[in-house]
Amino acid sequence: AKGSRARACNRHEGRRLFHGGCRGQNGVKIGGLPPPGDQRRSPTTNLTPILLRMSRNPVYIASDVHLGAVPDEVEDAFLGFLEHVAANSRHLILNGDLFDFWFEYRDGHPPGYERTLAALSRLTRDGIRIDLLGGNHDWWGGRYLRDEVGLNLHFKPQRWTLAGRQCWVGHGDGEGPGDTGYKMLSAVLRNPLFVWSFQQLPVSWGGRVAKRVSSTHGKWRAPDESEMRNSRRLQRWGESLLAAEPDLALVATGHTHVPLVAEVAPGRCYVNSGDWVHHRSYIKLVDGEPPRLYGWEDSPLNERET
């Protein structure tokens, strides 16, 4: 009963967000992290416990949820994960393919994501930083996700210091040698002229085209041998990047739907956050600890976060 009430609340708030946007009083946008200067404290405040908590504040990385192509129970599980992040962290990275298809048209965006958009908006309003990197299914984010939901959008891989280590973070599609056909197609689909032309379509038309092209529907299974080969290829590329850049401590990808943590050298790792289509997996980074791979409830992975 408690879970039903929570889902009903999510659906209600989702409708409110979808129609009304994320604006506070006087039309002021709510979301993102407060500027450092806004964090005022009394001169007598003991900062030591606060700084200790901040130093061990985890960073969560998830990818390949493919909302819109997975059953409702997968979205329910992902919403539970977002609540967990809100209670335990101040930084979430969504490393591509959060949506099975996302595109911001002239007249709107695809429907059906209201519950998750509302949940993400609640997190950003509470000051949690959420970085969304474009994947091969949802590279075309824009004003709505940025200004209304409060996400930080990135259209290419990023280099960040996360949990005390230098990191390369990217979805992984198109990286490394091979996959020439996809790289050529990607160049066309991300061309500004193509994007502008597709934006002129009615929302429903674009959605139908994307659904016919997507191969995610019905793939709620473990990766097959072809996907495992793609995973090994991407891992080799990530390990070569670590070898070429000694200051780099972590390469984090998604895309292959194969969750993985591989230590290349002491304190230096290649990680893949897996997916939520089958594994319901994610990565947790904590300063001073190795990266951890966890599965959410009903995941085939054995490791659970306590």
Image: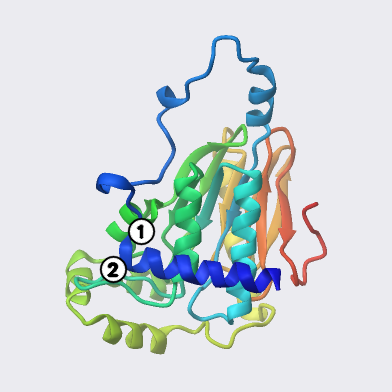
Tell me: residue 80, above or below residue 91: below
Badge 2 marks a residue whose secondary structure is loop
Residue denoted by label 2: 104
Q: Position of residue 43 (x, y in %)?
A: 55, 10
Quadrant of the image occupied by residue 277 = bottom right
Q: Are marks 2 and 1 in contact (CB under 8 Å)?
A: yes
Instruction: Indicate left or right for 241 with 188 as reference.
Output: right
Camera-side residue of 137 and 11: 11
Give the SS element for disc 1.
helix
- The residue at the point 60 percent across, 10 percent down is 44
Residue 243 lies, in percent from the top left, at 60, 43
The amino acid sitting under disc 1 is Leu
Where is residue 187 shown, x and y percent of the image?
Answer: 30, 67
For the point 67% across and 80% down, which residue is it?
225
The tag on residue 37 is: none
Q: Residue at x 53, y 86 (%)?
A: 217
The amino acid type of the residue labelled 2 equals: Glu
- Foreground: 45 or 127? 45
The local crowd at label 2, few if under 14, some if 14 to 19, many if 20 or more residues have their Cα within 10 Å, is some
The answer to whether 126 appears left or right of 266 in the picture is left
Distance (Cα) linking label 2 and label 1: 9 Å
Give the mark, 2 or 1, whose residue is nearer the N terminus.
2
Q: Which residue is mark 1?
A: 145
Please tell me which residue lies in front, 280 or 187: 280
- Residue 235 visible in this rendered orientation of the protein: yes
Q: Would residue 138 be visible to someone looking at this image? A: no
**Viewed as shown, does residue 281 lie left or right of 238?**
right
Residue at image position (38%, 63%) is: 17
52 to 16, vertically: above or below: above
Query: Looking at the rendering, in which quadrant would you find the N terminus?
Result: bottom right
Categorize mark 1 by other alpha carbons within 10 Å: few (<14), some (14-19), many (20+).
some
